Amino acid sequence: MITVSGVSKSYNEHELFSGVSFTVGMSDRIAVIGRNGTGKTTLFEIIAGNIIPDSGSVSVRRDTAIGYLRQDVQPSSERSLLEYVSGSSDLISNLEHKIALVQEDLAEEQDEETVKGLLRKLGELQSLYEAKGGYSSEHEAKIILTGMGFAPSDFERPLSEFSGGWRTRIELTRLLFLSPDVLLLDEPTNYLDLETQRWFETYLKRYRGAVLVTSHDRAFLNNVASKVIAIEDEAVIFHHGDYDSYVGAREKDIETRKAAARRQEVEIRRQMRFVERFRAKNTKASQVQSRIKQLDKIERITVPRVMKKIHFNFREPPRSGRVVIELTHVAKSYGRHVVYQDLNVMLERGDRAALVGVNGAGKTTLLRILAGVLPFERGERVLGHNVTTAYFAQYYIESLNPDNSIIEELRGAAPDEPEQRLRGLAGAFLFSGDDVTKRISVLSGGEKTRIAIARMLVRPANLLLMDEPTNHLDIASREILTDALDAYQGTLCFITHDRTLIREIANKIIQVRDGQVTVFPGSYDDYLWRNRSPDGQAETMQTQPRIGQSRQPSTAVKGRQRKALEGQLRNEHYRAISPVRQRITEIEQETAANTARIAEIEAIMADPSHYKDSRNVVAVNREYVALKENVARLTAEWEGLIGEAERIDADYRKRREELAG
């Protein structure tokens, strides 16, 4: 559908990429990756036709529709959410009006030939109405809106009432509804909570067109992409596979190139020694000149830059008491909006708790109460023995002094630390050599975030509270953050939409929903499994076990124990899959009955005598529209349940394989 041929682009003599060529097919799922500033968004703008490349061309098949989601797009309209998302409402309304007029004419017309002509016209209008999604468009828009985290009460709200992050989500929802042949999605998960991300991923997997996406969410890329286009050091690399397979292949390629570069260097030095040794001897003059020409022709093997892993001995924070912080019977409201009525939360030494829940559930409110920066109406907040806190808010980078250099900013947080140690810390966060003299004011958002985190860890508190620390960070910087938090020896509570960070750091999940908090000891994958299993009863904060008692993912077991666990696993699978399969059968039966009734009504509508009773025409038409909408709703539900059954079966197979070892 799209062919990119030899495209190059530079800005102010800085070359972003050169000679890029690739094609986009009907069902491609392509991840475009690279560090911040490498040109990913520029490549999307070129494909969308908004930027002209310096050289090369982009060819788009004539009938191909492209939908482009820019970062932080802010749609503005006084239309309702549902009207804006459905988009084609003007066309649908016009067709509905024309159909009603023809039906009115049929109810009054007596001439047989005229009736036949009106029937033909009615059939054409109804076919067009169906083709344009008239019977299902509003329902389909509601399904997508619900999947994207909007409540039914939001549907009639004007766009002007929604915040910036929600407006970006609205624009993404509209693109999904319009269903163009190619989706260009620039950081689509930036404002999506974890639950919405999972729904969005499933939707993209089933999407009928092609998808090109940029994202710094490693889990999202692995779940969606089957091809990778990586922009690295002005070169573009193509890979068939998901993100992790690209990383593995890239690491092998770099090691191979390092070895080849070393061999090449040995050979160059050998040739140079020959030249130096015999340069002054006339008998060797021709050989020397030949060696010099060979050296001039050698094309040096370049080795790509590799992002360093953190190698820094972070200071261990002072040891706290067993109970680090406890909230008891806390009540918090914003005006008439009650967030918590009876909040009880306790963090113990060594906890690495991730707060999860939909946007607006109250995660940030809870974190701010824990940090002591948000007052509440009732209850207690008690810090444990010898506890010191540090709070990283979403606006924390604004507290950096723009006039300071990087090293001055770190020195301000730890004035007694030796210069060498501060430089070592800066180097761990990718600021080496003269980089440490850069002013804060010239740094990017991601660089400021790295410095802010380094400043917190130079002399760490024993309780870190972090709200979206991955904002503005590319994948490489997120890996640095993960390494730093993994090395941290204190207690941690954090909010993030980055599932990779949660998986690698969290040993406890605290779910926030409807003003209640529920704790799930163990990993994020344990939480996902227990939260969906019919008998996976989560334990409340009042009855939470110690971290040492948390269930760990099972490894291979043998004998009677394995048979017992296999039986338990089969029972869990049966209880999970049975209601899904039963509902699938019910839907198929109801759809068959609806389809049969639709056929009967279409036969009635083909009979000219039907239109002599105008009230009957209206009633039958309403039933026809309702049946069509119901079939569309059932079909969408059926597709979702088929996907759910596939996921349940896949999880069962995976757990059974883990059990077998």
Image (cartoon, grey):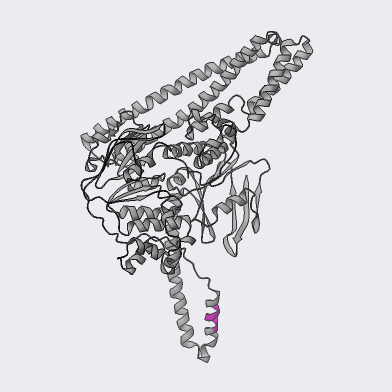
**Residue 582 placement (x, y as % from top left):** 41, 22
Placement of 100 over or under 445, stated as above or below: above
Q: Which of the 4 quarters of the picture holds residue 362?
A: top left
Report whether residue 154 is seen: yes
Query: Is residue 364 a member of the stretch shown in magenta?
Result: no
Placement of 612 over or under 52, stated as above or below: above
Main SS, magenta residues: helix
Report whether residue 506 is seen: no
Give the residue displayed 45% in from the left and 47% down from the top. Answer: 217
**Residue 309 placement (x, y as % from top left):** 37, 59
Front residue of 198/375: it is 375
Q: Quadrant of the C terminus?
A: top left
Placement of 293 over or under 303, stated as above or below: below
**Residue 612 placement (x, y as % from top left):** 70, 8
**Residue 67 placement (x, y as % from top left):** 60, 42
Front residue of 67/322: it is 322
Give the residue displayed 66% in from the left and 49% down from the top. Answer: 59
Q: Is residue 595 left or right of residue 513?
A: right
Magenta residues, start to end: 289-293
Q: Which of the 4 quarters of the picture holds residue 522?
A: top left
